[in-house]
Amino acid sequence: MDLEKQPQQPLTPAVPPPAEVLNGDDIRASDADRDRIADILREAMAEGRLTADEHAERVDLVYRAKTVGELQPLVRDLPAASGSTAHGPGPRPYSYGPEAPEGPADNLVAVFSSSVRKGRWRVGGRTNAFALFGSVEIDLTEALFGQRFTVINATAIFGSVEIRVPENISLRGNGTGVFGGFEVKSLESADPEAPVVVVNGYAVFGGVEAKPKRGKFVADLQRRLRKHLGH
């Protein structure tokens, strides 16, 4: 006896489980995310909110971070974090500080003595450095630039003028050495908004030297850390 054929029921396709929705803090951090957090930390140190050691420690953690959630605690106690999060707009143009009003030139004079200007200080548009049987040291690596162009007029007579700048600015010079040396290691920053320092002057039986100094918060440090940590 033939059995009546039953109609074949269509197979119901298997429904894949819903994809897991990642929490925002679990999203993998990009190089741009790390750079934005590093910019916040750099500005915080320039404003005196972080010490150099605190800044160095946090920057190291920034470039070791794998997720956005690891980045946020590093700037949670800084005011810039509320408006410049890892998902916020791109980094602002390069700036060390608010614009300073025009004023007279700064004068650093060393006659049979020494004069040093370093640390966190505001650089004016013009600085005159004069060394006579003495030495002048100008360190701009932690300085606040209130303007893009800074001119330093350096004169060394039987003395020396030494100028150190961050690695991520532009450095230019024009001078003469008479029985002495006038040396400026020219730099051109890749950032069009970076400060420009111009060193002019002369040395007689003395020396004027301007060159970059390896600092703790120069932009080059960000790329070196990423390369070293494999990001």
Image (cartoon, rainbow, N blue to C red):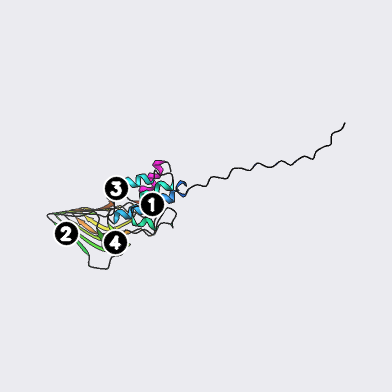
> CA separation, marks 4 and 1?
28 Å
Identify the amino acid type marked 4: Thr
Q: Residue at x 40, y 51 (%)?
A: 35
Residue at the extreme left: 112
Identify the amino acid type marked 1: Ile
Crowding at label 3, few (<14), some or many (≥20) Cα neighbours within 10 Å? few
> Which of 40/214 is in front?
40
Q: Secondary structure at mark 4?
A: strand
State which quadrant residue 138 falls in. bottom left
Q: Earlier in the sequence, mark 3 or mark 4?
A: 3
Q: Which mark is residue 37?
A: 1
The nearer-to-camera label among 3 and 4 is 3
User: On the rendered structure, is 226 left or right of 8?
Assistant: left
**Magenta portion: prevailing SS class:** helix
> CA separation, marks 3 and 4?
29 Å
Q: Residue at x 38, y 46 (%)?
A: 62
> CA separation, marks 2 and 3?
34 Å
Where residue 18 appears, as percent x and y from the top left, is 58, 45
Which residue is label 2 attached to? 109
State which quadrant residue 48 falls in. bottom left
> CA separation, marks 3 and 1?
14 Å
User: On the rendered structure, is 63 left or right of 50?
Assistant: right
Q: Earlier in the sequence, mark 4 or mark 1?
A: 1
The nearer-to-camera label among 1 and 2 is 1
Where residue 24 appears, as percent x and y from the top left, is 47, 49
Which residue is label 4 attached to? 150
Q: Which residues are magenta?
A: 219-229
Where residue 55 appears, as percent x and y from the top left, is 31, 49
Q: Which mark is residue 54?
A: 3
Specify whether residue 226 is painted magenta: yes
